[in-house]
Amino acid sequence: MRTYRYTLLILLVATAMLVTACAPTATPTPTAPAQAPTEQPTTAPAATAAPTTAPTTAPAATAAMTATATTAPTTAPEAPTVPTTTATSNTYGNLKVMAVEPNAKITFSGWGDQSEQQVYRDSIARFNQFYPGVQVDYQPIPADFQTKIKAQMAGGTAPDVFYVDSTLMNDLGRTGQLMPLDSYMAEVGETASDFIPQLLSMFTYQNKIYGLPKDWGTLGLIYLPEAFKAAGIPEPTANWTWDDLQKAAEAIQKTGKYQGYCMAADQARFGVFALQNGADYTNKDFTQATLDTPELIQAATFIENMKKSGALVTPSDVGASWCGEAIGKQLVGMTYEGGWLVPFMKQTYPNVVYNAVPLPAGSKGQADLIFTNAIGVNASTKFPKAAAALALFLTSEYNQGFIVKTGFAYSTHPSQINLIPDAIDQAIAAGGTWPLSEVNYSGLYTGQIQDIVSKALERVFLGAQTVDQSFAQAQQDAQNALAGK
C-alpha cells in the first residue's frame, strides 16, 4: 500500500477543500468496490477503488468541511448541460478529435452499480457527439470483474476498452496485453502532466502508459443521524478516535433498531486501521511482507474485538450485499465508504438522510486509503484508434468535468480538484490531505497481497482462527507471493 507519496495531491485537495467548503450543501453519494476511486466494494459498486499518500495536513480545510457536512443534502446538484457540439467539431476541451477507423465497433466494460453505469452511458453519449461513426457497445460487469476480464483475455473475447486496476495492470500491462497509449495521447495533444502524476504512475511501465486514471477517491465515516438520535449520543465529529467509534457502535447496537458499524472482511477497509496504527502490508520497496508486526496485529485485534462484541457486523450479517446498501436500508448506524456512495444513495435511496465526517484517528493519527483505477485498451482490438479515442475521451478533462459534478468521483486532472460538489464528498475527500494516507497499492503483487489480507480477516470473522494465527498464515502467504511463488 505504500508507494507514491501525494505531495502534489495534498496541496491540490487542500486547496479544493478550502474552496468547496464554503459552497452550499448539496446532495449525498466510491465506486471502491473498489476497488476507486474508486475501490470496488466486495459485492457492489466500484471502489477501489479503490487508486501513496497525501502530505501536509490541512486543518483549516478539515474544519471548514466539518462545518458544512453537518446536514445531508436533500437535492441533487444541477447536472451539467451536455454540449450541443456537432460531429464537425475537431476539438473537445483542449484536445483534438483524432481520425479513427471507419465503421468502428468497440465494446467497453467496467464494474459498478446502476448509478455508475449511468455515468458511463452519459459519457458514451458525449463521446458520440464527437465520434459519431464509432459504435460503442457498453457491457458492464458488476461482479468478479478481474476474473472475468482475465478469462476473456485468455479466450480472445475481452472488450476493446475496459477498467484497469492494479491487479489487471500487473497481469496485463506487463505482459503486452494492454496497448500503450502514449502515441495516441500525443495525437490529441494530451500529456502525462495533464493528470495528477502520482495517479498515473501506477499505470506506467517501462516509461509507457497503459492506462489513464479515470477517478480517485478516499473513505469517510458514513452514518445515519437517526441512529445516533435513537442511541441518545452525539453525532460523529472530525476529531473522533477509534475509541469513539467503538463506543458509538456499541450504543447504537443496543438500541435494537440498528446494528452499529458495518465492515466486510475487506482489506480496503482494514487498511485504514493498519495505517492509522503505524502498520502496512509490506515494506517500502515491496520486498518483505509485514502482516505479523505488533502494530498490524493490534489493529486487527481491535476489529476482532468489535466483531465479537456485536458492535461490528458484516453486510451478510444484516442481509445486505455491501455496507452502502446496509446504510441505504437503514440497517446499520455507520460504515466506511467512499464517494461512490453518493450517486448510489441518490439513485437507490433518495429519501434516506445520511451524513459523513472524515475517518476517526488511530494511535498514530489520521490516515486514509486513496483508490484509483484507469481505463485501458485491449492490445488485440481490431479498432485501435477508435478504442484509444474512447479511452482518451472518457478520462479527458472535458468528460471528467461532467462526471465530477454528478458526485460519482473526483477528477484526476489537477485543474478540476475544486469541482467537488457537496458536503458529503468534501468530508470523504479530506483523507486525501493527511500525511499518513497512502494509495491502496502493494507493488507488483498487489492483487495477491490484498486477497491474502481479506482472507485473513475472513478467517478471523468466522472464528476459524485467532488474529495471531490468521495473520501468521497471511504473513507466510504474502512472503511467498512477493517471492513469486
Image (cartoon, rainbow, N blue to C red):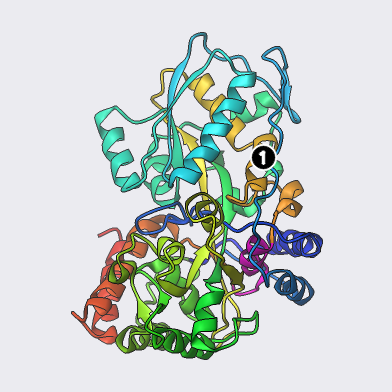
Magenta segment's dominant SS is helix
Residue at screen point 29% across, 46% down: 147
Tell me, yes or no, whether the highlighted magenta stretch contains residue 300: no
Residue drawn at x 70%, y 54% is 421
Query: x, y (%) of residue 288?
Result: 39, 71
Relative to residue 30, is residue 142 depicted above or below?
above
- Residue placed most toward the observer, 290 or 312: 312
Q: Position of residue 214 (x, y in %)?
A: 57, 44
Can residue 40 be seen at all in this image of the molecule?
A: yes
Disc 1 packing (10 Å; few <14; some 14–19; many ≥20):
many
Q: Is residue 201 above or below residue 397?
A: below
Range drawn in magenta: 423-436
Q: Secondary structure at mark 1?
A: helix
Residue ID at (69%, 38%): 397
Q: Quadrant of residue 331?
A: bottom left
Q: Is residue 429 magenta?
A: yes
Report the residue at 33% width, 39% height from top. 149
Q: Is residue 455 left or right of residue 13?
A: left
Residue 314 position, x and y percent, is 33, 71
**Looking at the image, is 115 positioned above or below residue 376?**
below
Q: Residue furthest left?
A: 464
| Residue closest to the eye, 280 or 90 | 90
Q: Is residue 210 visible?
A: no
Residue identifier under label 1 = 402
Q: Where on the picture, by quarter, is residue 191?
A: top right
At label 1, the amino acid type is Phe
Q: Quadrant of residue 73?
A: bottom right
Q: Nearer the viewer, residue 361 or 326?
A: 326
The answer to whether 363 is drawn above or below residue 58 in the figure is below
